[in-house]
Structures are given as structure tokens and as C-alpha cells.
Image (cartoon, rainbow, N blue to C red):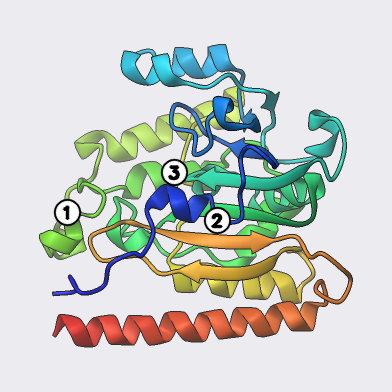
Amino acid sequence: MLGWFQPQETRDEILRRGVIPNVHRGIEIGALNNPIVRPEEGQIEFVDYGPTHVLKAQHAHLPERVAGIVDVTHVWTGSGSLADIVGGAERFDYAIASHVIEHVPNVLGWFRGIYEVLKPGAVFNLAVPDRRYTFDVLRHESTIGELVEADFLNYTAPSVRQMFDSCALMVAIDPGAIWTNPVDPETLPPFMGDIALPLALAQAKAIRNESRYCDSHCWVFTPKSLAALLHGATMLDLFPFVVEDILPTYPGQFEFFVRLRKAANVEEHRPQDRLTALTAITTALERHQRSSKLAAM
């Protein structure tokens, strides 16, 4: 049992670290109906891949969700310049994205776009699903080669491979249920049942023939694997942020948290210093993983 390990902050408090809503100007990506900072709290603008009416139409089968969907301020696919869309660079004091990164076709381009619109010293807080405790448990962790491919090919919508793996390899288990009901993931049935493979093929054809957008989990991470990806991308000068912290997945939960920051000066932006910080974070994650395994014995 790992009940002794409890988060010291609520989820919203973690995602609002470094944020003073009534003082700072912020941007939240993919808020849908559950914004971390609400419009009445301060200067917050919302970015999504489609306008408000499109999002409401896509979620029409969930009227309670539709009723709470925030008004989208800016439409951005996650690729290309975000500054051109929001009206200039270095406009915001913070950014927040909760369960968005896994849906973004081109993660490296997405990071660059958000970095461009943040002021020096601004924070970017993320909540990320942990593959090990979600319906993505059977999928392999995303690789640096896949990130580079998506960036070089400038994906603006999920690729055939991204969609196909997401659709075909999802399994039928509730997020976080693996903590309380340990199972062999290989024994879990497909989330989409017997139609999983035929549906994946049909959607692949729609992407190829009609350029259809098929929402997918394009990427799968664990805290340690994401740290490794950011380390590699930093070495290649493809990732501009300072990684301040990666919080491990708390027992009983299915997500972890990442705190990024735009360097306040040239010294902070030096790759070697950013790599050193990432190495320390990875070591801490490994230590936590070992202690968690011992506690569970």
C-alpha cells in the first residue's frame, strides 16, 4: 500500500503554481468546460483547435459539458506561430494545459508556439496522463524520433499512425483503476471491442482520402519517459523551456504534473544548465519510483 504518499496540494493548486489570476495575464490551452482559471478571476484567454461552436457540436451528446464550455478566444492547431494568432509575442505571464499535450499532433511545434507568446520568466504548467494507469497502458512510450518526425513533417492533425495506434490499442479500463484492481494489461479487452481494428482502418482511410481530423492520443508518456524526451529535445536545441519540476504520479491517480518556465535571461537559457536540471529531475523520479516499489512490497 502507498497510502502514506499524499499530494500536498490540490490538483488546481499545482496547475496554478506561479499564477496570480487577478494580476497576471494568462492563456489556457484546451480548457473546454473545465478551465483551471475562470474568466471572472482575471485576464485569461482560451486557445483550442476549433471555435466554440465546433467544440459544442462535437460534444452535443454531453449537454452538461456543452453548457460549461468556455468561449474560445483563439483557434490554433498547435503548429505554426501562435503569436500571429494572439496578436504578438511575449503577451502572457503564464500558460496552462491540462490533458492537452497527448492530443497535439506536433508537440515540439506546440511548445515553440507557446514559448513565443510567454514573457521572460513566465510559467507553463501541464497535467499529463500517465500511460501506466490509463487505457493507453499497452502502448509503447513515445520516442524522440516520433517527435522529430512530427515536427519535420509539420503535423497539424493526427497522422494515420498516431490515430491508428490510439484507436486500436486502447483497452477497456477506467483511468486509475489499475491501482485498486491490479490486472495483467495483456488480458484487457480493446476499448472499442471487436470493431477496434476495422474502425482504426476506416479512420485511416478518412485521414488519407478526406484529410479528416480524428481526435487521438497522439503521444503516450510516463514522468520518466517525458523527462528523457525533453532531455533529448534540449540537446538537439528543439525544446526551449527550462524544466523546473516533474511531479510523479500520486498513488491512486493517473496523471502527473510538469512545471516549465521561459528563461528570464540568457544565462538561464543555456542548454547545459537546462540539461543539468533535467538530469536532477530524472534522478529524483527514479528515486521516487524505487521507493514506491519498496513501499508496495
Q: Is residue 40 visible?
A: yes
- Which amino acid lies under the numbered mark 3 shown in the image of this protein? Phe
- The CA span between labels 3 and 1 is 18 Å
- Which amino acid lies under the numbered mark 2 shown in the image of this protein? Arg
User: Is 294 rendered above or below residue 104?
Assistant: below
Write down the quadrant of residue 65 in the picture: top left
- Residue on which the image places disc 3: 164
On screen, residue 32 versus residue 153, left or right, reads left
Query: Which one is in front, 157 or 107?
Result: 107
List x then y, in percent, for residue 93. Answer: 73, 47
On screen, residue 263 versus residue 180, left or right, reads right
- Residue on which the image places disc 2: 17
Tell me, yes or no, whether the two marked residues, 3 and 1, touch with CB atoms within 8 Å. no
Query: Which one is in front, 56 or 72?
Result: 72
Residue under the point 58% across and 19% down: 71
On screen, residue 291 versus residue 211, left or right, reads left
Image quarter in which the C terminus is found: bottom left
List x then y, in percent, for residue 137. Answer: 30, 59
Residue under the point 28% across and 59% down: 133
* Numbered circle sitting on residue 188: 1
